[in-house]
């Protein structure tokens, strides 16, 4: 590492995570599966410390880059994805209140009046057991988001 301090990050702990997870560029479906496994492992944790969050961001970026180059699936609006997951899992809108904080916020997101926040995406990825990337959809708000990806 360069020796620079990153605010809020314990560099020793971060380096240990780098050794443990060994992030690297994704070149094929085997590499992709390994990276998705790390993402799943991190998302399964109750809460992430700053170092784990940085590793999750790094590996998610690698997955997004690979998917952007290799997966051609039409994007879906995040609210359409949420509705599909609710219906296919026999869930109801109020099942998402613990993620969003209130039923009115869930309604606003599903109606398109409110955008998803990172914490919502992480919570829904855990709840539905899917990659956070499925909630990025075709967003044009300055976020460089990947397309909705099929299970690779």
Image (tube, rainbow, N blue to C red):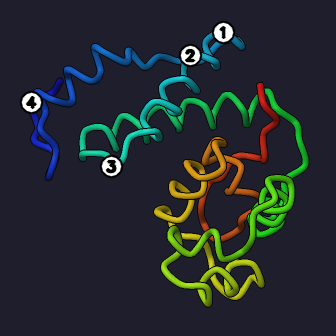
Secondary element at image label 1: helix
Give whichever of 66, 47 is nearer the camera: 47
Residue at 75 percent of width and 78 percent of height: 110
Residue 131 position in % (x across, y down): 63, 41
Residue at 63 percent of width and 18 percent of height: 33
Q: Residues within 10 Å of mark 4 (few under 14, many from 20)?
A: few
- Return the disc, 2 or 4, that comes first in the chain's sequence: 4
Q: Residues within 10 Å of mark 2 (few under 14, many from 20)?
A: some
Q: Is residue 55 left or right of residue 11?
A: right
Residue 34 numbered mark, or none: 2
Q: Are marks 3 and 1 in contact (CB under 8 Å)?
A: no
Q: Quadrant of the N terminus?
A: top left
Residue at 90 percent of width and 49 percent of height: 74
Q: Which residue is mark 4?
A: 3
Q: Is residue 87 above or below residue 42?
A: below
Q: Which residue is mark 1?
A: 30
Q: Residues within 10 Å of mark 3 (few under 14, many from 20)?
A: few
Task: Identify the image quadrant of residue 13.
Answer: top left
């Amino acid at each position: 590492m360069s020796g620079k301090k990153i605010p809020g990050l314990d560099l020793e702990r971060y380096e240990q995570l780098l050794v443990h997870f060994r992030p690297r560029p994704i070149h094929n479906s085997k590499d992709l599966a390994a990276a998705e496994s790390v993402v799943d492992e991190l998302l399964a944790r109750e809460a992430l410390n700053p170092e784990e969050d940085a590793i999750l961001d790094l590996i998610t970026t690698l997955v997004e880059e690979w998917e952007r180059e290799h997966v051609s699936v039409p994007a879906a609006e995040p609210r359409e994805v949420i509705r599909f997951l609710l219906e296919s899992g026999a869930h109801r809108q109020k099942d998402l209140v613990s993620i969003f904080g209130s039923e009115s916020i869930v309604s606003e997101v599903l109606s398109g009046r409110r955008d998803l926040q990172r914490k919502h995406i992480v919570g829904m990825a855990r709840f539905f057991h899917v990659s956070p990337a499925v909630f990025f959809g075709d967003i044009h708000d300055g976020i460089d988001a990947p397309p909705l990806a099929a299970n690779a």
